[in-house]
Image (cartoon, rainbow, N blue to C red):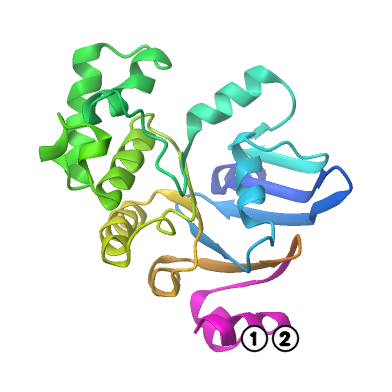
């Protein structure tokens, strides 16, 4: 019985994950477990391996050693497994990666129609609901080039949600935005967290991490240095490396 409960609770299990780019050892045995409905924020200096690590969760990056399991499916070179996992894991990047020649509505409906074989009318209905959820319903017929950066990133979030993922990965989703646009994107992410979405977020937004994260993790030089509740992480870090990092960003 306890094993069944365990399976239900843990949705991402990464054990001793290693990755090399040639001779460069990017991830040096990183282990992390994320529970359903949990929000985990990854912080750390540039080049610490944060983005590479979360990109292994949906096979955008391969790993050479260790084990990653997403909702009970082991992530291997099996293309069928990779395809299944990618349907369950939404991802939002620094750059919005929207199709410039498609309207906002078309950007959001594309994957459900082609991948999930949704009927166009259903996909459009769902897309309008999601655009309302992220606060840009009135932009549905516009093209990405007509929108602000913050609006484009909210379209990117709606597009990821259109696949009805169980997990959302965010790779520095606000770092390409002007400061006044950051808040509107973080507000959407806050609402997702409140709705119980499992989220792994790479960000430098301390306020967001303090308020929304269940756990904050520091990575440095391909290692997981420290993990704890926001209160423990920011107010009482155990590791000298964490204290040094926080002294530079707080």
In this picture, residue 8 sits left or right of residue 164: right
Residue drawn at x 62%, y 35% as measured from the top left: 60
**Residue that numbered label 2 is attached to:** 240
Crowd band around label 1 with a 10 angstrom C-alpha radius: few (<14), some (14–19), many (20+): some
Seen in the picture, residue 32 relative to 229 is either above or below; the reply is above
- Answer with the quarter of the image where residue 108 lies: top left
In this picture, residue 3 sits left or right of residue 123: right
Image quarter in which the N terminus is found: top right
Q: Is residue 147 magenta?
A: no
**Cα–Cα gap, marks 2 and 1:** 5 Å
Seen in the picture, residue 185 relative to 99 is either above or below; the reply is below
Residue 27 spot, x, y in % from top left: 77, 53
Residue furthest to the left in view is: 138
Residue drawn at x 59%, y 36% as measured from the top left: 58
Range of magenta residues: 224-250
The residue closer to the viewer here, 196 or 221, is 221
> Is residue 2 in sight in this rendering?
no
**Residue that numbered label 1 is attached to:** 243
> In terms of secondary structure, where does tag 2 sit?
helix
Q: Is residue 236 magenta?
A: yes
> Is residue 133 in sight in this rendering?
yes
The residue closer to the viewer here, 45 or 167, is 45
Residue drawn at x 76%, y 40% as measured from the top left: 63
- Answer with the quarter of the image where residue 111 lies: top left
Residue 245 spot, x, y in % from top left: 63, 80
Tell whether label 1 touches label 2 (CB within 8 Å). Answer: yes
Crowd band around label 2 with a 10 angstrom C-alpha radius: few (<14), some (14–19), many (20+): few
Residue 54 spot, x, y in % from top left: 61, 48
Residue 56 spot, x, y in % from top left: 66, 41
In this picture, residue 62 sits left or right of residue 202: right
Seen in the picture, residue 42 relative to 211 is either above or below; the reply is above
The residue closer to the viewer here, 242 or 199, is 242
């Amino acid at each position: 019985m306890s094993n069944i409960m365990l399976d239900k609770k843990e949705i991402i299990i990464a054990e001793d994950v290693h990755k090399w780019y040639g001779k460069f050892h990017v991830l040096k045995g990183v282990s992390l477990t994320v529970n359903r409905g949990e929000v985990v924020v990854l912080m750390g200096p540039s080049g610490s391996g944060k983005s590479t690590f979360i990109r292994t969760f949906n096979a955008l990056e391969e790993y050479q050693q260790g084990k990653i399991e997403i909702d009970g499916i082991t992530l291997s070179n099996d293309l069928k497994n990779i395809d299944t996992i990618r349907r369950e894991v939404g991802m939002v990047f620094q750059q919005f990666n929207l199709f410039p020649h498609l309207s906002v509505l078309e950007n959001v409906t594309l994957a459900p129609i082609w991948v999930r074989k949704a009927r166009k009318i259903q996909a459009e209905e769902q897309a309008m609901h999601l655009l309302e959820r992220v606060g840009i319903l009135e932009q549905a017929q516009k093209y990405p080039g007509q929108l602000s950066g913050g609006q484009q990133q909210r379209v990117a979030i709606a597009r990821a949600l259109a696949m009805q993922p169980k997990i959302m990965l965010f790779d520095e989703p606000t770092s390409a935005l002007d400061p006044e646009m950051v808040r509107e994107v973080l507000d959407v992410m806050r609402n997702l967290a409140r709705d119980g979405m499992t989220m792994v977020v790479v960000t430098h937004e301390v306020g967001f991490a303090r308020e929304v994260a269940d756990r904050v993790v520091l990575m440095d030089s391909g290692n997981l240095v420290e993990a704890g509740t926001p209160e423990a992480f920011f107010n009482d870090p155990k590791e000298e490396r964490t204290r040094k990092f926080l002294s530079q960003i707080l």
